Image (cartoon, coloured by chain):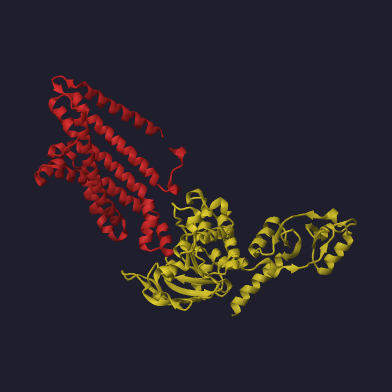
Chain colours: A yellow, B red
Amino acid sequence: MIRLENVTKVYPDGTVAVRRVSFEVLKGELCVLLGPSGCGKTTTMKMINRLIPMTDGSIYIDDLDNATMDETKLRRNIGYAIQDVGLFPHMTVGENIETVPALKGWTKAKQRKRAEELLELLRMRPHEYIEKYPRELSGGERQRVGVARALGGDPPVLLMDEPFGAIDPITRLELQNEFLKIQQEIKKTIILVTHDIYEAIKMGDKIALMKEGQLVQYAPPADLLFRPKDSFVAGFVGADRGLKGLQLIRTKEVMWKSPPTAHPDEKTEAARKRMKQYGIDRLAVIEPDGKLRGWASASDAQGAGRVKEITKISSVAAGRNAVLSEALSLMLTSGSDVLAVVDQHNRLEGVVTFKTIQETMREAVQRGASQ
Amino acid sequence: MRHLMILFALLTLLLGATFWVTSLGKVGIYSTFTYSDLLHSAWAHFKMVFIAVVIATAISVPLGVLVARTVFAPLVLPVIGGANIGQTIPSLAVIAVMAPLLGFGLQSAIVALVIYGLLPILRNAYTSIKSIDPAVIEAAQGMGLTGIQIARRIELPLARPVIMAGIRVSTIITVGTAELAVLVGGEGLGKITLTGVFAQEPLIILQGAAPTAAMAIALGLVLELAERRMTPRGLRIEPESF
């Protein structure tokens, strides 16, 4: 979909900003350009929509050489979102989003429909926001409108320069998660520039790590973490790459599906036997309607009586799409080495243990080292 | 809104003073100017100001916008600096210099007024373009707006209120400076004021000065209202902060 071949940028004063960079982004993929500041990642991105003219090499979009395409036409088919958003302050949210549709000559009705759709997509109620002006929005809302505007003309390709950069960490996390969901729906080909390795690992299907204008490694996040090409990459991903790798795996991939459970009304005797049978020291206690009630531990199950009498009520649980770093964090804060994985109705789907996480990570690191 | 009321009160006071002196008919050994003299001078004054501001605007706005573009950055300092120097020369001197250069007459007066009225417009035109968030322009370029579209749809609407403010300030200054035009053969209310000065008759000075001040206030008000109308809604300050 997007192919860079030996792309080079030399400034008139002789500075080489980008040197012979080549990589290809497949249709529907999200590629992250990652690197320290001044590594040429933004320059590389801006050469794709020709905001910066390249000195040498070629860029193909859908096998069309972007140098031969009409500049404005090229840009109208590439969504563009930047860190400072740059919403037009004298236009409403609706008018901002309708900019490219209007340039493309869509009818007024179709433009408005598109703006409403996109606001909906970004979880902003259209009737509430469409007539607002940028100054009436919060930072996070502006970023959303910026993304909506970039998607305005329904471009197949999206360029994003630190689109979640200028907002507080909590809102950023929220927006990243939402954007990932949105991307699953819209399946655009995206190039996202960031200097934040966590964002890169979380968002990228592939990561292009750059250093001093050169592409150092182009690989999926797991390879970058566990099969760093050289010491620069290893240094950049950091000594805590194991921890970072926890962001790549979701609980549903490693959880123990349909684990043994206990019923509040059954005898503790039976529960104890079941724990022994599976070699575990704790059982999830499940209500008749399937909802998680809490945990019963082997040490409490010595005497007679019912399971409900020894159940420690707990609602700590992770969703099936939570990443392992979140699961681990929940374990650490709740002081337990097992964690329930539940669906949106708090019904148990499985459990993740500390040991599972440990083994998963060790495996990933070993796999990387052996290849 | 409160400052509007104060200005209206002031305007009434000044016009009242003018009518009062005119109605006296005679002060000391001098006759006051008649209503028809007054009207004629006021009209001549207004025409001079109008022509001068229109020319100053026509020169300053394109120049300011041009200078604000990064490509023309090297020109920034000389132009703004030159205009700044122009402003430090007393208006009387600018006008006085015009007479030997261009001879006596309206043209000298207008050229002097244009030179003097340039700076506020130039400075505001320059700042108005410069103060636009670069991210806004980058986003517009990235979305595929052409240079002309960016100028028309983005830069102009954002710059207009600031440029209008420059024109307003320039107009008010020019109304005052035009008092001196009579020295180089121009016309206007300065004729009345200066007659009063030479006759050492304060009431006749007032007969020329009061309507001049009234004109400055009135034009300032009209232009301020125009400025507000031209400010896009998204940029308007909320009413409570007035």
Marks counted in the figure total 0
Left or right for A208, reference B150:
right
Instruction: Report if residue A365 is visible in the image.
Output: yes
Residue B236 spot, x, y in % from top left: 43, 45
- Give above or below for A230 relative to B170: below
Residue B175 spot, x, y in % from top left: 24, 38
Q: Depth check: give the residue in front, A118 or A369.
A: A118
Identity of the residue drawn at 16% across and 31% down: B194
Residue that lies at the very extreme toward the top in this rendered image: B28
**Which quadrant of the figure has residue A333?**
bottom right
Residue A227 spot, x, y in % from top left: 56, 75
Residue B125 spot, x, y in % from top left: 31, 50
Residue that lies at the very extreme toward the bottom in this rendered image: A371
Instruction: Report if residue A44 is visible in the image.
Output: no
- Give above or below for A254 relative to B228: below
Left or right for A252, reference B124:
right
For the C terminus of chain A, give its image quadrant.
Answer: bottom right
Q: Depth check: give the residue in front, B187 or A332.
A: B187
Identity of the residue drawn at 22% across and 35% down: B42
- Give above or below for A77 relative to B5: below
Residue that lies at the very extreme toward the right in this rendered image: A304
Left or right for B47, reference B100:
right
Q: Depth check: give the residue in front, B177 or A55.
A: B177
Left or right for A135, reference B43:
right
